[in-house]
Image (cartoon, grey):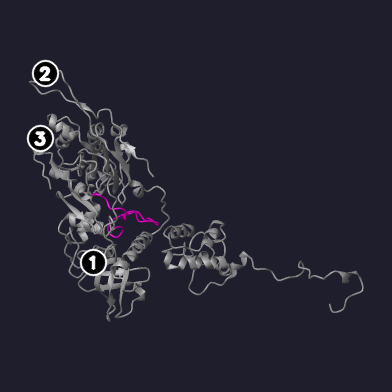
Amino acid sequence: MENRVKVLAAAASCFCFPAMAGMEIDTVENLQRKQSTYQSLDETFVIQNETYRGQQYSQIYFARLHMMRTLLYSLVTHWKPHVPVCTVLGLEEGKECIIVGTLYKHMKLKPCILDEYSKERSAVPLVKHHNFMHPDDHLVLEDESGRVKLGGTVLSPSVYVTGVVVALHGKETGAGDFMVLDVLEAGLAPQIEPQLKSREDKYVVFISGVSAGSSLSNPLQFQLLVDHITGHLGDEKEQGIAAEIVHVVIAGNSVEIPLGLLNGQNLASKDQSRLSEPVQELDILLTQIAAGVPVDIMPGSNDPANFSLPQQPLNRWLFPGSRAYNTFRSCTNPHCFELDGVRILGTSGQNIDDLKKYSEGRDGLEFMERTLKWRHLAPTTPNTLGCYPFTDRDPFLIESCPHVYFVGNQDKYGTRILKGSEGQLVRLISIPKFCNTGMVVVVSFYMYYIIPGSETIKPELVLQKLLPCTFTCGFMSCICSFLDLEHL
Amino acid sequence: MATTPSNMKGFYKLKKNKSGITKPTSSKKSSLHLVPSLGSDITQLTALISHGSPDLKDYHDNHEELMRQFDINMAYGPCLGMSRLARWERAQRLGLNPPIGFEGLLKAEKVRSECWWDGRI
């Protein structure tokens, strides 16, 4: 069992404010920031014992298929107990059975490296970058023994992507296709109920897409947010609310290094300083946050970290100021941790952005819901999303359902509660890019007061109170918008 | 000898003298005399002896044959890109119950540590 690390109060965690003008300036109150227990669950995403020995991605696909198939076999016995289970090679024409395998979606418009070498150099129109779907896309199911094309209308190719493991009930047709009659996904993973110990209201702030150093970002906006979090803004009441912020999570794309500098040519000395300025700017602000509240920083697609998932923590030497504080943590992407027993899992957005390119959905939250139901954070890895070639495991499989699931660097804010078939409740949060919207998401961990002898507190009541509020941190409107938080 | 001689030699069993003229046993050098098949070039020959011993020797080793069956077995997943021991350990961890004797063979280095296709593909 990992040790629960009690967050140590950093030196400046209690801050005092001068009394308002007009009152006597002899009483100065100290407001103490609330604390919470923190436990990092990132071990599965850290690449430490893996060595690259020339393996290909077949190993990770095997690990994924095996783990998911074991799970699906146990679910299938309750789903359709009288239908036999067989492998793809064991299919017999006309006989109804259940097969379990990995889906592969054949996409006509998906860019292929071989297109560059095709002999027909016709003027192919530019494919729209945001989505590669086509009405002719079809699904194929594959296991170790073989693959079979899927037919029927039950399984919609626009919903599924390559890499999802499902169980299918159907029968083989004369043409050799498998006509799907019904589909079983793994569903939400089992969830551990949060331990209701605290009686206090606590907040967690999620920011994403700060993009320090970019032309779009306004450093004053971020400074305003930092001032609010550290309690340098507002009157008693607002400082009181700021004192209830127990954790800050920065979900990716915190810097934007000018792309013109990264073309591999030797840099002039003035360009070299331009290269390090965004990170230095970020460090200055992070130091201010870390001095007051625990902060986790995750890498994103634009950050100076490795490209393929799971992204490894940003090097601590990038942040010489912040690393002095034990409240500063550099984390992996995806990031999983527990705060007061509440399990929080999320990514910087690459997994959902890739799903948007290869499938269709109403909004980002629908893609998030699908990943939870498929029990896999990033099913398109390693097909269209870069990933480390693990040999013995697939770290993106979701073993325990989180209570809060967040995705960063999205276009707009969104949230909803997802209910599972076994009573699981997950708060889905789509965090918008801070540099575009000026919005952060504040999640309230309000716990009902437990009166001894009263009825046992139902988890639904607790989790429904995990209300995220949008917090607009505009340059002029910081203080007034804080007062009209949107409760959903 | 059909009759027992009356002298001392009869008390001792006569053994054939092995140091006499015998046919030379096959040595590693003799493999170089293999006639390459039509159309192949020197690289194919080096592949056959890349691990220091010709293929012919492997075929006679029962343990290697067992390991080759382990390599081919689809239940334990792909074999390329992993050492045999790592693949055995993965199979063990995933609950596939690979034959326990193989672990001993691999750790005692009685068989090759890589799968049969390693270096050949």
* Picture layout, residue A221 above or below residue A427: above
Tell me if I can see residue A154 in this picture: yes
Q: Do the residues marked 2 and 3 share a common chain?
A: yes
The answer for which chain carries disc 3 is A
The answer for which chain carries disc 2 is A
Of tags 1 and 2, which is closer to the observer?
2
**Which residue is under mark 1?**
A107
Instruction: Give how far across and how far down residue B67 sits, in percent.
Output: 51, 65
Q: Residue at x 14, y 49 (%)?
A: A412
The answer for which chain carries disc 1 is A
Q: Dot 1, how many residues are within 10 Å of its Cα: few (below 14), some (14-19), or many (20+)?
A: some
What's under tag 3, amino acid-wise?
Answer: Ile
Instruction: Give how far across and how far down residue B37 sits, in percent.
Output: 52, 74
Residue A133 colored in magenta in the image? no
Q: Element type at marker 3?
A: helix
CB contact under 8 Å: marks 1 and 2? no
Instruction: Give how far across and how far down residue A252 sits, in percent.
Output: 24, 45
Q: Which mark is residue A479?
A: 3
Q: Earlier in the sequence, mark 3 or mark 1?
A: 1
Q: Which mark is residue A24?
A: 2
Depth check: give the residue in front, A6 or B7: A6
Q: Element type at marker 1?
A: loop
Label 1, label 2: how far apart the Cα atoms are: 72 Å
Q: Earlier in the sequence, mark 2 or mark 3?
A: 2
Q: Do the residues marked 3 and 1 share a common chain?
A: yes
